[in-house]
């Protein structure tokens, strides 16, 4: 059996991905599939943290574009991520995976407050940790949250879950001639404006040499293959 290359990882999953084939909300079948994949790597001894987005319920930036105060809209988006985190926690615990939700906005009835050392301790005790409510600050995306939390907990990599099998030079859904990258340096992602993560997140990863694996999470087993270092998707890391 192949050994794992990454032993502590942070999975970043968008709220839109949680919709599955629906147009809004949370698809229970998709959650169950995700929970089974996480359960598999968790049982193998991998320490897993998750950052979830909230775009399936509310997008702060979109609401701001329509006239809502940006900070207020972003706080609403943070609350949407808590709902998604609780749904994922439920799916994981039905697989008998011990899980903790940690929120950057205190809401002690449903989640623990985010405390870095406590999060690390949960991981060391074999619990999956789900980070909710972004950074707790407006104007920061959940991509930036993922980079920040990954660095804070000492993750070996960020796994950016998508519906395509990596990073392309154009949208493969509209351009059949789009070219897929197997590997990219951070600076090229920034210079070419490739939609991997937002620029703040990419810069954080670049400054701290934290690799980002972009992969298709809809293919069963891809999370495990990516953690083993198999050529799944695109890896973004340092390079010339």
Image (spheres, grey):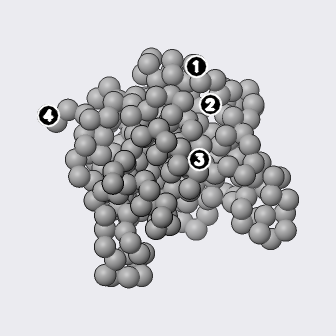
Q: Which residue is mark 3?
A: 144
Query: Where is residue 236 drawn, in percent x and y?
Result: 37, 52
Q: Are marks 1 and 4 in contact (CB under 8 Å)?
A: no
Give the quarter of the figure containing the N terminus: top left
Circle 3 or circle 4, nearest the eye = 3
Q: Toward the viewer: 28 or 80?
A: 80
Mark with earlier residue (3, 1)? 1
Q: Using a 10 Å C-alpha cutoff, classify the residue at mark 2 as few (fewer than 14 neighbours), some (14 to 19) or many (20 or more).
A: many
What residue lies at 51% left-to-right and 56% top-to-bottom?
A: 197
What residue lies at 30% left-to-right and 40% top-to-bottom?
A: 227
Q: Which residue is mark 1?
A: 118
Q: Using a 10 Å C-alpha cutoff, classify the residue at mark 3 as few (fewer than 14 neighbours), some (14 to 19) or many (20 or more).
A: many
Instruction: For mark 1, give the secondary structure.
Output: helix
Circle 1 or circle 4, nearest the eye = 1
Question: How far apart, in angstroms, are the residues tagged by discs 3 and 2?
Answer: 16 Å
The label on residue 12 is none
What residue lies at 33% left-to-right and 51% top-to-bottom?
A: 239
Question: How far apart, in angstroms, are the residues tagged by discs 1 and 4?
Answer: 32 Å
Q: Are marks 2 and 1 in contact (CB under 8 Å)?
A: yes
The label on residue 102 is 2
Instruction: For mark 4, give the secondary structure.
Output: loop
The label on residue 1 is 4
Question: How far apart, in angstroms, are the residues tagged by discs 3 and 4?
Answer: 34 Å
Residue 164 placement: quadrant: bottom left
Instruction: For mark 3, give the secondary structure.
Output: helix
Give the quarter of the figure containing the C terminus: bottom left
Mark with earlier residue (2, 4)? 4
Q: Are marks 3 and 4 in contact (CB under 8 Å)?
A: no
């Amino acid at each position: 059996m192949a050994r794992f290359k990454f032993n502590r990882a942070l999975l970043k999953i968008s709220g839109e991905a949680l919709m599955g084939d629906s147009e809004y909300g949370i698809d229970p079948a998709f959650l169950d599939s995700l929970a089974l994949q996480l359960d598999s790597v968790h049982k193998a001894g991998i320490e897993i943290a998750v950052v979830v987005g909230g775009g399936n319920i509310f997008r702060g930036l979109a609401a701001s574009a329509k006239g809502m105060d940006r900070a207020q809209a972003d706080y609403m988006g943070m609350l949407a991520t808590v709902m998604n985190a609780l749904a994922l926690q439920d799916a994981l615990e039905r697989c008998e995976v011990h899980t903790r939700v940690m929120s950057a906005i205190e809401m002690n009835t449903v989640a623990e407050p985010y405390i870095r050392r406590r999060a690390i301790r949960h991981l060391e005790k074999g619990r999956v940790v789900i980070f909710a409510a972004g950074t707790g600050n407006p104007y920061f995306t959940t991509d930036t949250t993922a980079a920040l939390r990954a660095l804070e907990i000492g993750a070996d990599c960020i796994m950016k879950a998508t519906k395509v099998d990596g990073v392309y030079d154009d949208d493969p859904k509209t351009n059949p001639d789009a070219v897929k990258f197997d590997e990219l340096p951070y600076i090229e992602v920034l210079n070419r404006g490739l939609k991997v993560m937002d620029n703040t997140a990419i810069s954080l990863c670049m400054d701290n040499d934290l690799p980002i694996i972009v992969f298709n999470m809809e293919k069963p087993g891809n999370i495990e293959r990516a953690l083993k270092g198999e050529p799944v998707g695109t890896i973004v890391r340092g390079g010339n």
